[in-house]
Amino acid sequence: DTGVSQDPRHKITKRGQNVTFRCDPISEHNRLYWYRQTLGQGPEFLTYFQNEAQLEKSRLLSDRFSAERPKGSFSTLEIQRTEQGDSAMYLCASSSRTSRTPDTQYFGPGTRLTVL
Amino acid sequence: DQQVKQNSPSLSVQEGRISILNCDYTNSMFDYFLWYKKYPAEGPTFLISISSIKDKNEDGRFTVFLNKSAKHLSLHIVPSQPGDSAVYFCAASAQGYSTLTFGKGTMLLVSP
């Protein structure tokens, strides 16, 4: 069990550029989540997948944001036309949800995005 | 509207003493509660959880208490160690929903 991994760990970009982040969940976890955390706040939910299906999206996820999980394994989060307000830590989490157990999510190390 | 509130931004405790971190929630649909620990520049690490059918869950030095009538939970760390110094987040989820709602966190500093 190697845990949740995220790549890159840090990304600095200029306003208006597109960025893409990758998340590899714990193997055999069927659920994958994206959260965003800004300074002084707790993580805020963005979207989640069960296998390859995107089941829920937060209103925080503007149309500049898109997430995919094409084969039900790794996931990508793309931000188009980045804005300075997108600067944050982007966290990925995964879980193995069954009907009998609550959903404990395990987080990756995060990708720190800085938009100049 | 913050549904999960951690009203103490910081807490200082001496090594060996008990640390008590508090969390309040407003959404009566929440039925599963978790505590995460976070070091700078790292992702949150799961510590301990509790279902609403219980009022206490213990794991080593960590114990979580849930008071449903007061919509309040607390995390007790005994004895506290300097390595426990981190930001602690309380999180909650509602039955039928998978997303976690987090508080703003409490920074715990354990001094030798």
Image (spheres, coloured by chain):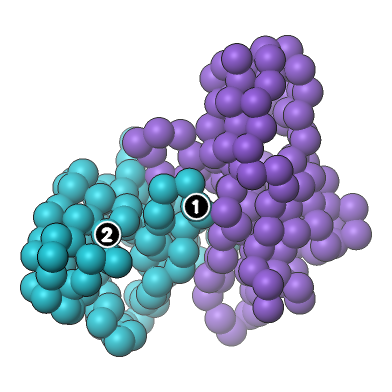
| Colour for chain A in the figure | purple
Label 1, on which residue?
B42
Query: Residue sitting at 73 percent across and 12 percent down?
Result: A16
Q: Is mark 2 on a helix, strand or loop?
A: loop
| Residue B101, horizontal then vertical, whole percent | 44, 51
Depth check: give the residue in front, B63 or B19. Answer: B19
> Dividing the picture into quarters, in which one does residue B1 lie?
top left
Q: Which residue is farthest front?
A: B112
Name the kind of residue labelled 2 in the image: Ser
Q: Please determine whether, in this image, residue B89 is positioned above or below residue A11.
A: below
Q: Do labels 2 and 1 share a chain?
A: yes
Q: Name the residue under label 2.
A: B85
Horizontal arrangement in the rendering, residue A90 relative to residue B105 (left or right): right
User: Distance of mark 2 from mark 1, alpha carbons?
Assistant: 14 Å
Q: Is residue A32 visible?
A: no
Viewport quadrant of the C terminus of chain B: bottom left
Sequence-first tag of 2 and 1:
1
Residue A73, position as x, y percentages in the image: 83, 62
Q: Which chain carries label 2?
A: B
